[in-house]
């Protein structure tokens, strides 16, 4: 049975676990960024309750679908730009800098881990990144600041400047294949972890939600921090039902570990 805790006791337990960690992995979901004011996708009032998702095959087949998707992506980009990394993001960055967390695997597309100070090479974005775009054919990166003026002027969706292919914000849409390289890196990190801390994820979206299972199977201590229970709580060594920022803030201040 897991230890179920919150508040100062939770921070104390986490401190001891991080102190012993040599290959810590942090896995984050939307819950960590809601504390920065970014709405999540699945909860009541979240993004998918307000907007029907545009599926990948719709994006590829229809200019109308592409226009709708791009319009929403710029709304999200503005939300990302207004948000700031919170205590949870800063704590994770501090733990990476201290050598206690080796890898950050995130389901989020907002880039807040990098803005908090985690080196980009330590962040694995398994659902992509909503702050830039790529060509679906040749993979060339395109900056949204270059795309936005033309789109907002006449609604024409962008084409690749290199090959003429469709350009899409670099996120994984419904019906789109998961990124092979990122998933292999995430699975490798989970296999090697001695501590795996899942933060702010409902742990219902697979294959990403399988990563804590992999880590636990390979001998890692498993911690789940989420305001609501998850289906994997019974598998964990420690379950913390509390606000992420309040639990993690002492690590951001470098007062622990």
Image (spheres, rainbow, N blue to C red):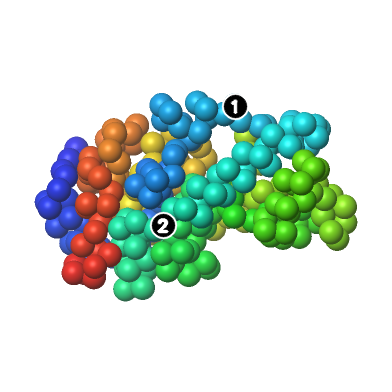
Residue 57 visible somewhere in the drawing: no
- The numbered mark at residue 11 is none
- Label 2 residue SS: loop
Residue at image point 77% right, 51% down: 150
- Which quadrant is the C terminus positioned in? bottom left
Q: Nearer the viewer, residue 38 or 26?
A: 38
Separation (CA) of disc 2 from disc 1: 27 Å
- Category of crowding for the residue at label 2, using alpha-carbon neighbours closer than 10 angstroms: few (below 14), some (14–19), many (at least 20): some
Q: Earlier in the sequence, mark 2 or mark 1?
A: 1
| Residue at the front extreme of this rendering | 153
Residue that numbered label 2 is attached to: 84
Left or right of 136 in this view: 102: left
Q: What residue appears at the point 44 percent right and 38 percent down from the top-left corner? A: 40
Q: Position of residue 18 (x, y in %)?
A: 25, 63
The tag on residue 52 is 1
- Does 146 sit left or right of 2 as displayed? right
The residue drawn where x is 39% and y is 58% is 85
Quarter of the image for the N terminus: give it. top left
């Amino acid at each position: 049975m897991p230890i179920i805790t919150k508040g100062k006791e939770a921070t104390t337990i986490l401190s001891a676990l991080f102190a012993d960690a040599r290959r810590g992995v942090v896995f984050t979901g939307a819950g960590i960024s809601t504390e920065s004011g970014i709405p999540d996708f699945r909860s009541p009032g979240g993004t998918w309750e307000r907007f029907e998702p545009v599926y990948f095959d719709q994006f590829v087949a229809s200019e109308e679908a592409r226009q709708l998707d791009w319009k929403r992506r710029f709304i999200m980009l503005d939300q990302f730009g207004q948000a700031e990394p919170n205590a949870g993001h800063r704590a994770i960055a501090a733990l990476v800098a201290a050598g206690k967390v080796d890898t950050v695997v995130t389901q989020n597309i907002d880039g807040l881990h990098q803005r908090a100070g985690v080196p980009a090479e330590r962040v694995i974005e398994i659902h992509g990144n909503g702050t830039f775009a790529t060509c679906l054919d040749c993979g060339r990166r395109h900056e949204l600041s270059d795309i936005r003026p033309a789109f907002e002027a006449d609604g024409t969706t962008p084409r690749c400047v290199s090959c003429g292919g469709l350009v899409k914000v670099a996120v994984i849409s419904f019906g789109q294949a998961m990124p092979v390289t990122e998933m292999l890196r995430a699975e490798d990190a989970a296999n090697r972890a001695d501590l795996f801390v899942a933060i702010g994820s409902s742990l219902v979206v697979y294959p990403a939600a399988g990563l804590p299972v992999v880590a636990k199977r390979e001998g890692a201590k498993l911690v789940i921090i989420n305001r609501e229970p998850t289906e994997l709580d019974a598998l964990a060594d420690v379950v913390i039902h509390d606000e992420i920022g309040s639990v993690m803030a002492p690590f951001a201040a470098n007062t622990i570990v």
